[in-house]
Image (spheres, rainbow, N blue to C red):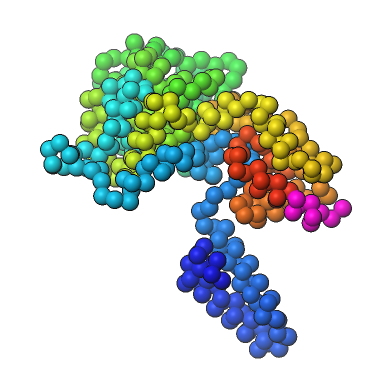
Amino acid sequence: MNLWFHRISRPLVSEICQRIITDERKKLLAGNPAGSLTQLIEKISEECSQVYNRRIRGVINATGIILHTNMGRSPLAASVWQEAATVNTTYSNLEFNLQTGKRGSRGGLIPDLLSLLTKAESALVVNNNAAAVFLMLSALAGDKEVIVSRGEQIQIGGGFRIPDILALSGCRLVEVGTTNITTTEDYLNAVSPDTAMALSVHPSNFVIAGFTAKPTISDLSSNLPEGVILAVDQGSGVTTEQISGETPIIRHIQDGADLVCFSGDKVLGGPQSGIIVGKKKLIEKMSSHPLMRIFRPGKTILSLLEEFLIRKLNKEETGHTELILNLPEKELKSKAQKILRGLNRECFSIVPATMLAGGGSSPLKSLASWAIKISLNRKATDILKQLREYDPPIIGIINEDSVHLNTATLFPEDTAHIRNALKSLLSGNKP
Ligand SMILES: *Cc1c(COP(=O)(O)O)cnc(C)c1O
């Protein structure tokens, strides 16, 4: 039981024990035969283990989807985590100016580092990119009009719909163009004295292909009137990474976007956050908006992001997505070979696969990878479930009725676990 105390807390274990013992008592009173003590303990352990599965725990991502929102998107480098520990386990100058001895601004060097990374005048960090979009709209467009193309009125993940967010912020949505074609003229014709902003949203989880057109950011920037803010929800946070089809933040800034917002935990590879970069005056206006008090991240996020950005600028650390996208295909295959060494090759084979950036970062980006295909006389869903019951849980995918474990997203220390899990699958294999 000590293990379960440690894993889910003593009171939770106690609650489970009481519930199961009460159930047993009822069964006895109803005239059923008594089970053994071992059976009772087994039942309790099983229940504890189910509760433990609801706890936030490390898992092995064998899906080949690098940025999986359900699996915490981008893992942080251990070195970044360790370096930020001090700030989090002592008092810090989070909002204290060491120069003046007075209250200072939150965020340390982060705005400076982000400016260096994106060539923007200034920067601001909030809890996530959804908050970043909402803050831009609320603080800068208030009850005014915001122009959005009909091809970009999208839903990202659960419950984040651009038209709804706009309505919630109090802005009036002015739709322009059509699903597939929107022109610069469409935007210009929609401009009125009440227009505060034109918002361009990166369609990060789908593609419109075929007969399509939309103006570039530089078209919009050079044609929109001075007073209309040009904001881009870039989403994925591509800065120095080479990802085909993705426009880096720097490019948007150079092309004349006034503001660009993106997630800190997608391609960038930092902790969960929303980052807004752009014109100093606009960033200042958002910083002093009351919503900022609601959206500001805590010291944990800020210290991690600051450390990550320093290492990224020093080229000592690479974002997780970039790291994986640059892995040589040969290495991915040899990972699979290493896992399978000496194991039955009729049950486990190495097959070509693809990896995806995922997580609403780049809908088309798929690169070659390798996977272990599991061929046992058992239902694929049962095999997936058994792999999830392993400690640490292993998350695979089903491809044409077989379970595949993609090697792209595996950490070096995962290989031994997968090997053991495959061995235990084999021993329970009913031909
Ligand atoms: C991912 C994404 C968001 C939401 O970002 P979160 O950090 O999950 O809040 C918003 N807009 C775009 C274009 C995105 O890709």
Q: Position of residue 320 (x, y in %)?
A: 51, 33
Residue 233 left/right relative to 285? right
In the image, which residues are magenta? 423-431
On screen, 124 above or below 421? above
Quarter the N terminus occupies: bottom right
Q: Where is residue 406 in the image (x, y as percent from the top left)?
A: 67, 37
> 291 or 332: which is nearer to us?
332
The residue located at (82%, 44%) in the rendering is 344
The residue located at (54%, 44%) in the rendering is 71
The residue located at (54%, 49%) in the rendering is 58
The residue located at (38%, 25%) in the rendering is 313
Q: Where is residue 63 in the image (x, y as percent from the top left)?
A: 63, 39
Q: Is residue 79 magenta?
A: no
Q: Quadrant of residue 227?
A: top left
On screen, 350 above or below 329? below
> 257 or 73: which is nearer to us?
73
Residue 21 left/right relative to 87? right
On screen, 371 above or below 179? below
Residue 327 left/right relative to 157? right
Q: Which residue lies furthest to the right in this view?
A: 431
Q: Where is residue 80 in the image (x, y as percent from the top left)?
A: 42, 39
> 252 or 327: which is nearer to us?
327
Q: Quadrant of residue 411?
A: top right
Q: Is residue 428 magenta?
A: yes
Is residue 96 at least partly visible in the picture?
yes
Is residue 404 at least partly visible in the picture?
no
Residue 102 left/right relative to 301? left
> 346 or 353: which is nearer to us?
346
Total number of numbered discs in the rendering:
0
